[in-house]
Image: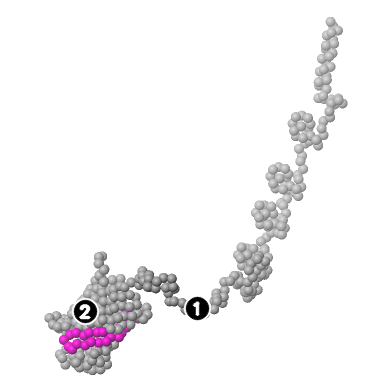
């Protein structure tokens, strides 16, 4: 029994000794050796198969350690600041990312032959001192652009861009060839009935402004007071037509209240525009009144003179061979949009003595005055009303004044006017 107990105790002691022998003494030869540090990886060290060496990583050389690797902890940048890259290799884009340092801003100006105003405006180069210089070589040379004639040398940045005097490149002006005038006046007549074509052209002209219009104007309808006499007078006109040709009918005269007409004048005229401002007029004139009647041929002109003076003149040849003339002029001075002052002048002439009509040779009479009117535009109806007040001075000259005094009339004087002007 004792023998069995001794054997069991000896066996347990041997096993315990074998279990602790690997922790403090060299391992038996049969166990595998520990892997060197150069073959021990972090994974094996974590499993207890080997031991990592002391963490003393050497910093990577500056030539191989980049800022990106240093930011990830793979290496350490040297303490000293990085040397700036040479100006020839450091671009502004790299400098903006911190990869290099631009040198001091001392760019050398590009030669005049390669620095253009466009590049200088972008800061790529500096233009030389202003002065005449040859035109730089065309930057588009060799780009398969059409060949152009050589331009004269100039410092103009637009030289050679076809922005010069257009007249130098314009074709010469020449009259149209004879063939252009050999055809019909209207090519439309070659393909359509000429009568229908003429009708269509007339409709086209009418639709584009060739309309016939009319106007009736009572220029003066007034009461004249002065020298103990009250006289009524009128001056009216009517015309109908287009821009070029018109028919005119005019009438003027005066008389005393309670008495006969002192004189009435009617004119029927054809008017033709000779330019944008004046019309030539021709027709007949008929005088009515207490004196002898006269019929005259009329030739005159009227229109708008420079500075907006309305002027008109006419020659009259009576059936008795008497030649007289008349000149009229007036001007509308707008004091406001509706208040208008109108100075007016009228002068009559006779080329011979006509005792039967109490006219002497030369200037026979003249009237000068001014009318102040206020124009009223009613909301309904086309007529415009313009009441006015004014003054007028009339004077007879030479033998005409003698004829008037011999018949008991005044040769002239001042008169006060009160009237109305209207048109539609």
Q: Tell me: 65 left or right of 323.
A: right
Q: Is residue 258 visible?
A: yes
Q: Please state which of residues 133 and 282 is positioned toward the viewer in this rendering.
A: 282
Q: Position of residue 109 (x, y in %)?
A: 67, 66
Earlier residue among tags 1 and 2: 1
Q: Please state which of residues 210 and 77 is positioned toward the viewer in this rendering.
A: 210
**The N terminus appears in which quarter of the rendering?**
top right
Q: Looking at the image, which residue is at 23% across and 73% down?
A: 387
Q: Position of residue 418 (x, y in %)?
A: 20, 77
Q: Looking at the image, which residue is at 82% across and 34% down?
A: 36
Q: Quadrant of residue 369?
A: bottom left
Q: Which residue is mark 2?
A: 234
The numbered mark at residue 179 is 1
Q: Which residues are magenta?
A: 284-313
Q: Position of residue 356 (x, y in %)?
A: 19, 92
Of labels 1 and 2, the one closer to you: 1
Which secondary structure class fits the magenta region best? Answer: strand
């Amino acid at each position: 029994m004792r023998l069995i107990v001794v054997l069991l105790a000896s066996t347990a002691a041997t096993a315990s000794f074998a279990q602790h022998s690997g922790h403090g003494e060299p391992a038996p030869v049969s166990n595998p050796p520990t892997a060197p540090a150069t073959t021990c990886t972090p994974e094996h060290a974590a499993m207890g198969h080997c031991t990592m060496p002391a963490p003393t990583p050497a910093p990577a050389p500056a030539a191989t350690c980049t800022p990106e690797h240093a930011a990830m902890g793979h290496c350490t940048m040297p303490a000293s600041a990085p040397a700036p890259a040479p100006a020839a290799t450091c671009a502004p884009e790299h400098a903006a990312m911190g990869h290099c340092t631009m040198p001091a801003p001392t760019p050398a100006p590009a030669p005049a032959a390669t620095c253009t105003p466009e590049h200088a405006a972008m800061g790529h180069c500096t233009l030389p001192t202003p002065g005449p210089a040859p035109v730089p070589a065309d930057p588009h040379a060799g780009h398969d652009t059409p060949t152009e004639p050589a331009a004269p040398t100039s410092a103009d940045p637009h030289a050679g861009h076809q922005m010069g005097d257009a007249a130098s490149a314009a074709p010469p002006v020449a009259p149209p060839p004879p063939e252009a005038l050999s055809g019909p006046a209207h090519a439309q007549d070659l393909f359509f009935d000429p009568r229908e074509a003429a009708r269509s052209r007339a409709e086209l002209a009418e639709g584009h402004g060739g309309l016939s219009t009319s106007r009736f104007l009572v220029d003066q309808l007034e009461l004249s007071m002065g020298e103990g006499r009250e006289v009524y007078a009128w001056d009216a006109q009517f015309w109908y037509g287009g821009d070029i040709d018109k028919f005119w009918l005019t009438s003027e005269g005066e008389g005393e209240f309670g008495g006969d007409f002192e004189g009435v004048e009617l004119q029927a005229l054809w008017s033709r525009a000779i330019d944008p401002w004046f019309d030539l007029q021709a027709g007949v004139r008929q005088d009515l009144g207490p004196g002898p009647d006269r019929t005259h041929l009329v030739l005159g002109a009227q229109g708008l003179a420079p500075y907006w003076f309305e002027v008109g003149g006419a020659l009259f040849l009576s059936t008795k061979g008497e030649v007289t003339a008349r000149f009229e002029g007036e001007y509308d001075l707008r004091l406001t949009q509706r208040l208008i002052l109108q100075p007016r002048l009228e002068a009559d002439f006779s080329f011979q003595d006509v005792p039967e009509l109490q006219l002497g040779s030369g200037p026979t009479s003249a009237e000068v005055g001014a009318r102040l009117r206020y124009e009223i535009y009613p909301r309904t109806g086309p007529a415009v009303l313009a009441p006015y007040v004014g003054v007028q001075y009339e004077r007879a000259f030479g033998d005409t004044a003698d004829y008037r005094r011999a018949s008991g009339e005044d040769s002239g004087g001042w008169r006060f006017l009160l009237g109305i002007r209207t048109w539609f």
